[in-house]
Amino acid sequence: AEAVELPEFRVMLALEGAEVSSPADRDRALAEVSPVLGEMGESASRDDLVRRVSERLDLDPAMVLRRAGEARGRGGGEAPVRPRFEQGASAAAVIELTPRERRERALLAMCIARPADGAEYLARLGDGHLSAAGARARDWLRDHLEDPGSDLPHDDPELSGIVTELVISSRAEPASAEAMELIYLQLEQRRLEAQIGAAGEDFERRAELSRERADLVQRIAEAHQVAG
């Protein structure tokens, strides 16, 4: 009976039922969870919830923390929370990427680290899963997976920079088949939600996509358990 009062349960319950196919929907979901986050002090638990909210709503973690601080301020508590993500140059660089971009780059780096599995995921990743820059990196890796850092185009600094970053990340970050599948499913969820938003008033299509999304959410929950 007491479990319903736990911040994690309240936040995840709100996110589970949230429609996130448009900016307005994501704003409403963020407004619902911000007071719960605002009640929490600085802790690893709050940081983990902020991460999950930012990934689910495809928002910058700094924005989630700022809204949590504003909600706490309106409630008469302490001053608004200052995002830890602003500390240091490396953290600032992370903020420049959206949650989807961070996920896609993590998966692409794992494709380099595990080329046998990577070839399969590179084939499965469509343009709807990726940002424009991520799609360009995917195309390069499809043709250069065995040695992606060689023969990079000197006249294309954006592509060269991204591929170089992915190669470095592939050597530093752990990769597993379970983690690759989880990230792929998260990117698939984002793709479906974009399609739901684009369906407009085609309610039959929206319903069909929403059913697919519900099944996918269950698969993601199971993948989370497997990936640990």
Image: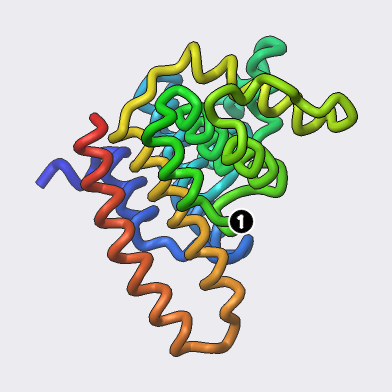
Farthest residue, direction right: 155
Q: Are there few (<14), some (14-19), or many (20+) residues within 10 Å of tag 1?
A: few
At horizontal 44% and vertical 26% (from top left) the residue drawn is 47
Give residue 12's position: percent from left, percent from top: 33, 47
**Side (left or right) of 72 relative to 16:** right
Q: Is residue 171 above or below residue 187?
A: above
Residue, disc 1: 127
Give residue 31's position: percent from left, percent from top: 53, 53
Dot 1: element:
helix
Farthest residue, direction left: 1
**Side (left or right) of 153 relative to 113:** right
Quarter of the image that includes the C terminus: top left
Question: Along the line of sight, which residue is nearer the eye, 143 or 133?
Answer: 143
Give residue 70's position: percent from left, percent from top: 60, 38
Question: Would residue 82 be seen by someone viewing this image from the given angle?
Answer: no
Give residue 145's position: percent from left, percent from top: 55, 31
Q: Is residue 152 above or below residue 89?
A: below
What is the image's colouring?
rainbow
At horizontal 64% and vertical 17% (from top left) the residue drawn is 91
Q: Is residue 175 above or below residue 131?
A: above
Residue type at the position of mark 1: Asp
Question: Would residue 110 be seen by someone viewing this image from the given angle?
Answer: yes
Determine the image quadrant of residue 195: bottom right
Question: Along the line of sight, which residue is nearer the eye, 86 or 145?
Answer: 145
Question: Along the line of sight, which residue is nearer the eye, 125 or 77?
Answer: 125
Disc tally is: 1
At horizontal 46% and vertical 65% (from top left) the residue drawn is 19
**Side (left or right) of 226 relative to 1:** right
